[in-house]
Image (cartoon, rainbow, N blue to C red):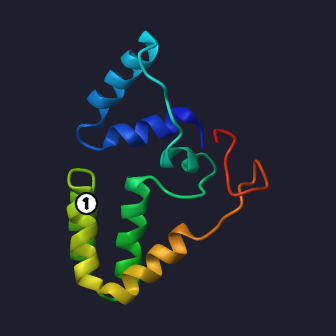
Amino acid sequence: MNPQYIEKEIKKITGNEAVLEELYKVLESGEAIALVGAGASAEADLWPLWNKFLEEFVKYSLKSGKISQEEADFFLRQAPQTPLETAQQLRNKIGDPLYFEYIQETFKDKISPHTDGAYTRTH
């Protein structure tokens, strides 16, 4: 996954574009230090950013039979605008056992094809 794709995905979430632009300004001024956060793991598709996490969560919920296609379409439309609410609503719909199963599968230890470790080149 390339940096341009990651930036595009980050900007899809309402409010992120303005924050990202401000971050660039502060970093360029030398008044801040950038730390590698969870988004760095997206480089090798180790762990998803919010949009992909929610898209896959909707698909998982649909496949489990806990939501209808109509509900899945609704959640997919809502996810970019209200990611936390969407995740909570889906969790409530499918129940904790399936939610935690999805979380476990999504965030289990993975190996990067670029580093042969559980870290990316950015890390």
**Residue type at the position of mark 1:** Leu
**Residue 89 on image: x %, y %:** 21, 73
Determine whether, in the image, residue 88 is placed left or right of residue 48: left
Give the answer, above or below, for where 99 lies relative to 117. Answer: below
Q: Which residue is mark 1?
A: 84
**Residue 16 on image: x %, y %:** 30, 37
Give the position of the N terminus as an image quadrant.
top right
- How many labels sit on residues? 1
Residue at the (49%, 40%) spot, across then down: 6
- Residue 14 or residue 30, whichever sits in front: 30
Give the answer, above or below, for where 87 lies relative to 49. Answer: below
Residue 24, image quadrant: top left
Residue 19, image quadrant: top left
Residue at the (36%, 63%) spot, across then down: 54
Give the answer, above or below, for where 25 lies relative to 89. Answer: above
**Residue 33 on image: x %, y %:** 48, 25
Residue 66, image quadrant: bottom left
SS for dot 1: helix
- Residue 68 or residue 78, whichever sits in front: 78
**Residue 17 on image: x %, y %:** 30, 31
- Residue at far right of view: 116
Give the position of the C terminus as an image quadrant.
top right
